[in-house]
Image (tube, helix red, strand yellow):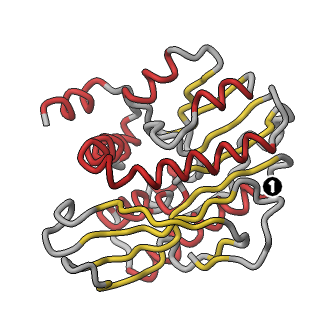
């Protein structure tokens, strides 16, 4: 707890981002990873494999953008830095683990950016959701990666709106859907290869492993492309509660341009 508190105190972060809970969330993920590393291993390996496949389809040199770089646990950073001349790790908060990785790679840049381009509206109590435009005109970009981000984009904004302004459950669901759909539309607008890794479903299991509940991680927004799926034991028994565990179903698409369009319900 002492280490987490020190990281919270000394990590640069805007007041808005801190108040909305992004720094605390990043530190919580770091702590959970240290406890659940073995349970997360398969998910992280398959996330990296999806990205490696995407790298193999992208032109060499140029620029790669990673939305949701997070702590870097799911990034094959060596392969990215070897293939691209510039690697942009985009997130609202960059804590020690990802800073340490970037420190030893001269072609890695940490970019602080609101991927939704709507957080200021949310912070001020407005539910106006924009369609992002950042990087769309950058012709040097050879690959865009949205990494374990899509299902998380709406969670803290909606929680903040509920806590500070009060919104109904229906409004929370509607705003979440708009944020998620805006990101999918944004990815489709890039004139380059785009890789998507996201959880699409949450499963709650009892102590005996029997499924108690199952629900969409994307508020029923449909992913318009097919890809590989796997399970992520994100919260093993006892992590959140002694009576249940949580498993995410994850979808990985190395290149949405080449993916079939049957669609996956999130």
Residue at position x 86%, y 48% in the image: 191
Q: Secondary structure at mark 1?
A: loop
Q: Say above or below: 17 vs 89.
A: below
Residue at position x 56%, y 75% in the image: 266
Position of residue 249 in the picture relative to residue 62 (left or right): left
Position of residue 43 in the picture relative to residue 18 (left or right): right
Q: Say above or below: 194 vs 107.
A: below
Position of residue 223 in the picture relative to residue 121 (left or right): right
Residue at position x 61%, y 14% in the image: 106
Residue at position x 31%, y 77% in the image: 204
Picture coordinates of residue 33 (x, y %)?
A: 31, 45
Callout 1 crowding tier (Cα within 10 Å): few <14, some 14–19, many ≥20: few
Name the image quarter holding residue 161. bottom left
Judging depth in this view, the residue of 74 and 210 nearest the camera is 210
Name the image quarter holding residue 167. bottom left
Q: Say above or below: 199 vs 69.
A: below
Total tally of numbered discs in the picture: 1
Name the image quarter holding residue 131. bottom right
The answer to whether residue 161 of the structure is visible from this angle is yes
Picture coordinates of residue 202 (x, y %)?
A: 41, 73
Mark 1 highlights which residue?
189
The answer to whether residue 120 of the structure is visible from this angle is no
Picture coordinates of residue 146 (x, y %)?
A: 62, 50
Picture coordinates of residue 19 (x, y %)?
A: 32, 45
């Amino acid at each position: 707890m002492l280490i987490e508190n020190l990281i919270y105190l000394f990590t640069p972060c805007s007041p808005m981002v801190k108040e909305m809970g992004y720094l605390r969330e990043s530190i919580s993920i770091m702590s959970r990873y240290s406890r659940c590393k073995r349970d997360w291993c398969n998910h992280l390996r398959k996330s990296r494999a999806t990205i490696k496949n995407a790298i193999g389809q992208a032109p060499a040199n140029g620029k790669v953008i990673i939305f949701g770089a997070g702590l870097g646990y799911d990034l094959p950073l060596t392969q990215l830095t070897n293939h691209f001349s510039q690697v942009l790790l985009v997130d609202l908060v960059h804590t020690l683990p990802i800073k340490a990785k970037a420190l030893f790679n001269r072609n890695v840049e940490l970019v602080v950016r609101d991927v939704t381009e709507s957080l200021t509206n949310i912070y001020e109590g407005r539910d106006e959701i924009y369609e992002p435009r950042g990087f769309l005109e950058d012709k040097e970009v050879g690959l865009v990666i949205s990494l374990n981000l899509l299902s998380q984009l709406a969670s803290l904004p909606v929680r903040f709106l509920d806590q500070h302004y009060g919104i109904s459950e229906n409004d929370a669901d509607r705003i979440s859907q708009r944020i998620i759909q805006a990101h999918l539309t944004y990815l489709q607008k890039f004139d380059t290869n785009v890789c998507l890794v996201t959880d699409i479903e949450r499963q709650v299991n009892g102590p005996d492993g029997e499924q108690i509940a199952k629900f969409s991680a994307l508020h029923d927004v449909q992913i318009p492309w097919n890809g590989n799926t796997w399970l992520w034991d994100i919260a093993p028994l006892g992590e959140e509660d002694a009576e249940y565990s949580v498993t995410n179903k994850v979808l990985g698409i190395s290149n949405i341009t080449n993916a079939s369009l049957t669609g996956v319900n999130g």
